[in-house]
Image (spheres, rainbow, N blue to C red):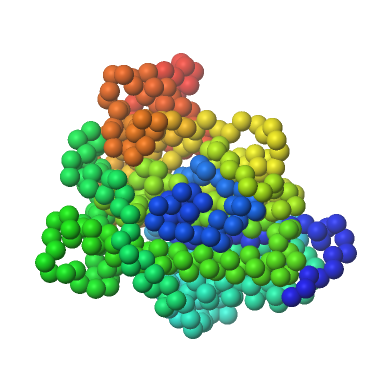
Amino acid sequence: MARHHHSSPQEDRPNIVLILTDDHAAHAVSAYGSAVNSTPRIDEIAETGALLENCFCTNSICAPSRASILTGTYSHVHGVTTLKTPIDAGQPTFITQLRDAGYRTAIFGKWHLGHGEGHDPEGFDQWEVLIDQGRYVDPEFLTVDGMITRPGYATDVITTQALNWVESLESEAPWCVLIHHKAPHRSWFPDEAHAGMYADPIPVPETLFDGKNDWPTRSEAARHQAMTIADHLYPVDLKVDPPEHLSGDELTLWKYQRYMEDYLACIASVDDNVGQVTDWLRERGDFENTLLMYTSDQGFFLGDHGWYDKRFMYDESIRMPFVLSLPRQIEAGQRHAGIVTNVDIAQSVLEAVGVASHPRMQGRSFWRDITQGTPEPSPDGFYYRYYENDDPIHHVFAHYGYRTDRYKLIYFYNDGLGLPGSGTETFTPKWEMYDLLTDREEVHNVAHDPEYRDVRADLEVRMWRSQRALGDTPHPSQPVPAGLAHDERGE
C-alpha cells in the first residue's frame, strides 16, 4: 500500500509498533550472540537502529513485567506483584498519554493482567486479547463485543489482526499498535512451517549440570526450586515419551533437546512475523518514521543451571532483548551498554514521539542515550524484586536485590507476605552476592567472603537507598545497613 500524503507537521509524529513476546531470552537472539539459533529479522531492527545490551526486568514474571512496561512504574506502585494480582486498568499508562495526545491506539494478543470490569484493557481504541495464556492454535480472543475464535496459529493471527487494524484507519493521525505474542511461552507448540527445524543437536549451556555440585555456596533457594529440566518438564512439555533406555544425564540431555527444539521453533515463527511487520512498514513507506520495537517481558533459563522458566534475579532470567529503530532519529547500528529497565520503556516511548510522560512514572527515559552523542550518565545500578514466594508450581523464594555493572546483591527474604499466588510457609532469610566480572555464570556466592565485605556493605546501602527512593518497603527481617548515615536510618 502506498503511503498517504502527510499534510501537517502534527501528522508527521512517528507511528509506534511494540512487538512484545513472552519468555524470549536475550541469549536466544542472534544479535545478542545466541549459540542456539538465528533471528535475522529481529537482528535487522538492531542493524537499522539500536540494541540495548543491558535491559532488565524488575520482577521476572509475565504479569508484573507487562504492567511495568505499560505504566512505567514498579510492581509495588502499579499493584501487579504476582500472577494472581490483576491490574487496575484505569491507572495512567503510556497508551493513555499517547491517546490524549491524539494517537489512535490498539493492542492485539496477550494481556495477562486480569479480566472483567476494571481489569480489561483501557485507553485503547481497539483491543483483542487472549484470555490468560490463550492457546497456540485457533486462539480465542476477548473483545469489546465478547469472545471470538480466529482460526490459525496464534503468532500469525495476532500479527494479521494488528496490521489489519492499521490498514483500516482512515485519518492521518499517528497510531500506536501493541503486538503481544503468546510465543514462546510454555508449552512451546510450534507451527507446521517451523516444527522440527532444530532437530540437530542444540549446543548445551556450560551450567546444565551445575546442580550436581549442589551449589555449595548458594542459598537454599537454588535447591528448593522446582523448575529443572531433569525433573520438572512434563508430558505436555515434551510431547513424546522419553526413550526407555535413557536415564541420568543422558535423559536430561534428551529433555533439554526436546524443550529447546520446540522453544526455538516458536521463536522462528516470531522472527518471521517480525519480518512481516518490517516489510509491511517499508511497503507503506512508513518504516523511516515508525518507532519499531521488539522485546520480551523477561528472560528465560535455557538449561542454564539445569533450569527452564525465570523468576530468579540471575541474569538469564532478568535480561530482556530490546531492539528498536526509528531511522529519522536513531543512527543505525548502535549498541547501548548502559543499564535500562522495563520501567524505563514508557517514558522512553513518550519522549521519542514528543508526548509528555505522566508524573507518576518512575525510572528514566533512555531515549537521549541513543539519539544524542553526550547523554547524561546511565544509572549505576537498578533494583529488582520478586514477590511470589514458594508458589505451588515453581517454588522460587521471594527476594529483592540490586545489580550494578559488576556486582549483584540478592536478599532472599523468603516470605509471601500473604500475597495471592504465594505459598503460606516462610523460610529463613539468606544473602547471595555475585561478582559478574569473575563469575559470569553466577555460581559462586561471595556474600560471606571476607574479601568482598566492603563491596557488600556498599551494595546494601545502595539497595536500601534505591528502595527508599522508589517508595518500596524493605522486609522487616532485613537489618538496616551499617553504612547508612544517621539521618537515613529511620530509627
The residue under the point 29% across, 41% down is 414
**Residue 434 visible in the picture:** yes
Viewer-nearest residue: 1 or 312: 1
Label count reads 0
Viewer-nearest residue: 322 or 384: 322
Check the image and name the residue furthest to the top.
486
**Residue 79 visible in the picture:** no
Left or right of 90, for residue 205: left
Check the image and name the residue furthest to the front.
200
Q: Is residue 18 above or below residue 480?
A: below
The residue under the point 43% across, 55% down is 28
Look at the image and tell me in which quarter the N terminus lies.
bottom right
Residue 176 in percent (x, y) is at 67, 62
Residue 280: quarter of image: bottom right
Residue 337 in percent (x, y) is at 55, 38
Left or right of 209, for residue 140: right
Residue 444 in percent (x, y) is at 28, 33
Residue 483 in percent (x, y) is at 41, 18
The residue under the point 47% across, 59% down is 38
Look at the image and tell me in which quarter the C terminus lies.
top left
Q: Is residue 426 above or below residue 43?
A: above
The residue under the point 58% across, 33% down is 378
